[in-house]
Amino acid sequence: MKRILLFSFVALSLFSCKDSANSDRPSSKYEGTKAQMADMEKDSPTKFLKVSGSSRNNLVNRTVVEGEVSNKSSLTTYKNIEVQLNFKDKEGKSLEKQKHTLEEVVKPGESADFKIKVKHVKDAESVTIDIVGADADK
């Protein structure tokens, strides 16, 4: 009986050991999921880039828009980030839209500040900022 118990214990110990060389490499399923995530992030930058900011008028009749772009992706770095400024009157009606490309490169999980100076739009009381596109950095 003791021999059977000892043999069972030894056999169980041998079969439960993993190859240490394989434990260092990610599984193919993980690599596949990672590749799918990277493709999704590259194809849909507006889902992973967030923008916040504010605007003010300076003394030389220019509107200064300052903000921050945050990259919420896990794997993709973005560049050539295109923002749209929407100038609105006091009732919230859109007066003019302008697109600008930011020079900043934003890595996954990081943020970048930006400043845009434009000619003041007549009757504009507020400005909203939206991300409309970006390129995935190679």
Image: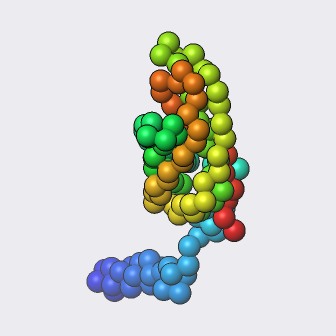
The quadrant in which the N terminus is found is: bottom left
- Residue drawn at (50%, 79%), measured in percent from left and top? 23
Quarter of the picture holding the C terminus: bottom right
In the image, is residue 101 above or below residue 79?
above
Residue drawn at x 45%, y 46% as measured from the top left: 66
Task: Please tell me which residue lies in front, 29 or 119.
Answer: 119
Q: Tell me: residue 95, above or below residue 105.
A: above
Give the number of marks.
Answer: 0
Residue lying furthest front = 60
**What residue is drawn where x is 60% and y is 59%?**
103
Residue 18: x and y in percent read 48, 80
Where is residue 104 drawn, in percent x and y?
Answer: 56, 60
**Can residue 118 be seen here?**
yes
Q: Up-down: is 29 above or below 42?
A: below
Q: Which of these two is toward me, 54 or 9? A: 54
Left or right of residue 113, residue 25 in this image: right
Taking depth in this image into account, of 70 and 97 the one nearest to the observer is 97
Horizontal placement of 12 versus 123: left or right? left
Q: Residue at x 59, y 38 (%)?
A: 119
What's the image's color scheme? rainbow
Percent from the top left, x then y, of residue 110? 46, 60
Vertically, is 17 above or below 72?
A: below
Q: Is 14 left, or right, of 107 in this rendering?
A: left
Q: Is residue 32 visible?
A: no
Question: As rendered, which of 60 and 33 lies closer to the eye?
Answer: 60
